[in-house]
Amino acid sequence: MIIIDSLLAAPLRGLMFVLEKIDDAVQKEIEAEEQAVMADLSALHRALDSGAMTEAEFDVREQKLLDRLDRLHSEGGSDAHGDASS
């Protein structure tokens, strides 16, 4: 009976494995995107500090990056695995 149960459960275990791998790949992609946004924000702050851009330009570009970061978090970013500190 155990063999039959194992055979019947195998497709479900296989599907769960595939779904976990897909979830892992999506999370890695979101994390990479978050890191890219954070790097862009750092570069933006350096440009403002060096005088390469005005405060108004900085505000517009910063808001776009922050909106992008918020979208990433709402799509299941770090909070999905409990990585966020907020």
Image (spheres, rainbow, N blue to C red):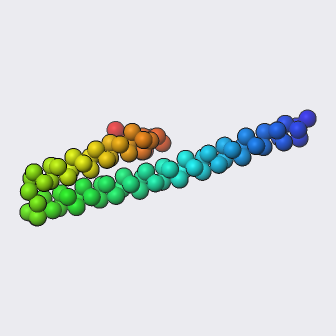
Q: Position of residue 68 (x, y in %)?
A: 31, 47
Q: Residue furthest right?
A: 1
Q: Would you say 46 lies left or right of 29 here?
A: left
Q: Nearer the viewer, residue 79 or 68?
A: 68
Q: Quadrant of the C terminus?
A: top left
Q: Residue at x 54, y 50 (%)?
A: 24
Q: Quadrant of the N terminus?
A: top right
Q: Position of residue 48 (x, y in %)?
A: 12, 59
Q: Residue at x 24, y 48 (%)?
A: 64
Locate residue 43: give its quadrant.
bottom left
Q: Tell me: residue 40, above or below residue 66.
A: below
Q: Residue at x 34, y 58 (%)?
A: 36
Q: Would you say 21 lies left or right of 31 here?
A: right
Q: Tell me: residue 43, above or below residue 67.
A: below
Q: Position of residue 80 (x, y in %)?
A: 46, 40
Q: Would you say 65 lies left or right of 73 here?
A: left
Q: Position of residue 33 (x, y in %)?
A: 38, 54
Q: How many marks?
A: 0
Locate residue 67: give its quadrant.
top left
**Whether residue 84 is visible:** no
**Whether residue 72 is visible:** yes
Locate residue 73: give its quadrant.
top left
